[in-house]
Amino acid sequence: MSDPTADVSDDPSGPVRVMIVDDQALVRAGFRLVLDSEPGLEVVAEAPDGQAAVDGLRGRAVDVVLMDIRMPRLDGIEATRRILSGRPPHPKVLVLTTFDLDEYVFAALQAGAAGFLLKDAGPAELLSAIRAVHTGDAVVAPGPTKRLLDRFLPVLAEPATAGRERLEVLTERELEVLEAVGKGLNNGEIAAALFVAEATVKTHIGRVLSKLGLRDRVQMVVLAYETGLVRIGDR
């Protein structure tokens, strides 16, 4: 079965093409300095706001977009929504956040962002996050992603159960895997909890993504919250 998280624009033989979107020129310069010094990564575009990013992606091959949230003209949430609602292939969007200030991160994930990265992340974290996003994996460990949702979900909305019928297409085991992902477990922990092989867990995750039309593991976490399958404080 093909990987539903794969992007047809990915070229494993070429560099990962990155666009940096931030209204602060010094931030863009800092990210570019790190990325340009790393083999296999190439900064192919920059943009000072969301509208410039949307416009700049037309006719340009980009694999990963580093997207700030708070910007003039068009913020990162709406820019992410427009980018990912356009004609495929779509780049992966990695949201940049200050964590303590950006209460709209969850909305960005709902818009289709593949995950988030703290603005004060070190070079190793930045490079790891970009490569993880490019391969369709979670941007960071599921635990930090879940803690971010724990923090901001109560601000935005209470988890609803109205969308639970969407989960009816899943088998009982696939539902268990979705719940485990929502609770922040990695593949090894899920395998141990369900007494199955890790390869089997990966297969179930692929089927969940395909059946529910989700892009990646982070969107599985978001859906688990939205449907009430996982609630604030669940472990």
Image (cartoon, helix red, strand yellow):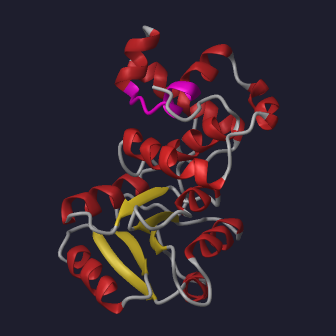
In which quadrant of the rendered view does residue 111 lie? bottom right
Estimate the x, y position of residue 195 in percent, counting from the top left: 42, 8
Estimate the x, y position of residue 163 in percent, counting from the top left: 79, 37
Q: Quadrant of the C terminus?
A: top left
Measured along the vertical axis of the image, is residue 3 above or below residue 120? above
Q: Let me know if residue 179 is in the magenta part.
A: yes
- Give the residue displayed 35% in from the left and 61% down from the top: 130
Give whichever of 82, 59 is nearer the camera.
82
Residue 102 horizontal side relative to residue 186, left or right: right
Residue 18 horizontal side relative to residue 231, left or right: left
Measured along the vertical axis of the image, is residue 7 above or below residue 46? above
Secondary structure predominantly adopted by residues drawn in magenta: helix
Q: Quadrant of the N terminus?
A: top right
* Number of numbered callouts drawn: 0
- Give the residue displayed 60% in from the left and 15% down from the top: 173
Estimate the x, y position of residue 88 in percent, counting from the top left: 66, 65
- What is the magenta range? 178-187
- Give the residue displayed 57% in from the left and 26% down from the top: 179
- In the rendered image, the residue lying farthest to the top is 195
Residue 167 horizontal side relative to residue 201, left or right: right
Q: Let me know if residue 48 is in the magenta part.
A: no
Measured along the vertical axis of the image, is residue 85 above or below residue 47? above
Give whichever of 153, 165 is nearer the camera.
153
Residue 88 horizontal side relative to residue 92, left or right: right
